[in-house]
Amino acid sequence: MQGHGLIGGYSRLPQKARLFIGMQVMFAGVSAILSLFINTFLLKTYGSFSVQVIIYNAVLAFVQPGAMFTALAVARRGGALTVQRIGFVFYVLALTILCVFGNGVSAYYPLFAVALSFAAGYYYSAYSAQVLSYTEDGNRDLISGITAMVGAVISVLLPILSGWLIVTFDEGTGYRIVFGIAAVLALGAYLTTLRLPKIPAPERAHTFWRTLTAILGDRNGRLIMAANTLSNCASFTVPIYVTLLFYNLVPNEFLISVSSTIGYGVHFLGALLYGQLVTGRNRTVYSVAAAVLVTLPCLAMLFGLNIYMIMVFQAVFGLATTFMSAPVLNTHFKVAEALGLHGESGPEVHLVREFFVTTGRLLGLALVWFVPRTNAGAVAVLVTLMMTAVVNAWILRRIDRNEQQRTEEAV
């Protein structure tokens, strides 16, 4: 079969790999809708800077580690695909209820947060096993490239379409249509998993507590978990806080979706630059430079806060976010490998990390809620979040020095 580039490469992939790509693309559509429009749905229902938005995201973050813990137990009995199918069932049920009843069920938002947290936890718990089962070294980069390309297009176009639908239809009809689209995508992803080859259940004892002890008993293990906490404090909180600021100024979902899309498009550019510029030696320098760069539009907000300044901030943050977060994630895997926690221990390492990720997310939400809602308060929140990258640069250098010291001692 002939073909060129990604399209030709896709046509030569085995069926299981093509199905895996399709499932990921549909999930990207679900995520693109949920990450933005659940928050605006609550803001529209309860008003700008409503406590309900903070509670929803706090529950979403708090429940997910527990959901992933139960997912590991389910995977041992039924395999990774069973876990993921349960996750998609949660997505379909929650989104269908939102589609059918709309504002009528908005008072039950904590329950939706729990359901969506279980859905995400179960999806991601199975993902690493799927990568190993449905891809090979020879086609893994191609599959990642196709998924990233199509996912990027969906993540750009779907929020804009959704924002337009919401502002075009009155009385919450637009939100119901958007949640209906997400429910259809989740159902399509579920049906796709029914055609994927079964992944055998892992034949090993549960090692979560052993993994946790190994990580916290090591200097670099403790340091990288602190870095994970700080990194996710920023990456989780900034999009939520920016949405709150934007909606407080102009409660228009279409404009919010356009601003978010600009940020995502520039983020794609930043990821490309990161791959070209960053090495193991200069990653901390670029991380600090990125944090300083994003701080500049933050400081400009002292002189006045408007939607154009927020758009500029989102664009700059989108450009810089990979430079601030990727070094932490890459170092996380390196530390886990150095501790011998890879391969079959991978799910437990991911679960341990998730507890620290949740801590960071909750700290970020607390910062948003308790800081005064003024221009100076907005600057204080955003600058504080950006400075986590500076602290993490110091942490990553400490980890590198510790590894160098261990190498010298071993010699």
Image (cartoon, rainbow, N blue to C red):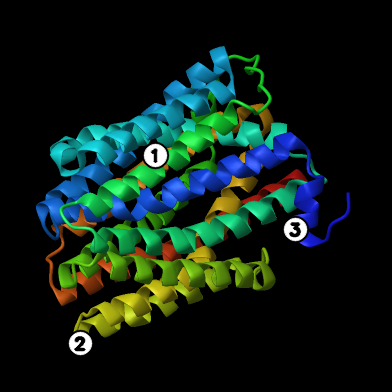
Amino acid residing under circle 3: Leu
- Residue 256 showing in the rendered view: yes
If you read the primary sequence from the N terminus, does the residue marked by circle 2 or circle 3 appear first? 3
Q: State the mark number for residue 239.
A: none
- Circle 2 is placed at which residue position? 303
Residue 188 on image: x %, y %: 51, 37
Which residue is nearer to you in this view: 289 or 175? 175
If you read the primary sequence from the N terminus, does the residue marked by circle 3 or circle 1 appear first? 3
Q: Is residue 351 left or right of residue 55?
A: right
Quarter of the rendering containing residue 6? bottom right
Residue 106 on image: x %, y %: 16, 41
If you read the primary sequence from the N terminus, does the residue marked by circle 2 or circle 1 appear first? 1
Front tag of 3 and 1:
1
- Circle 3 is placed at which residue position? 6
Question: Residue pushed farthest bottom?
Answer: 303
Q: Which class describes the residues within 10 Å of circle 2: few (<14), some (14-19), or many (20+)? A: few
- Residue 124 showing in the rendered view: no
- Circle 1 is placed at which residue position? 183
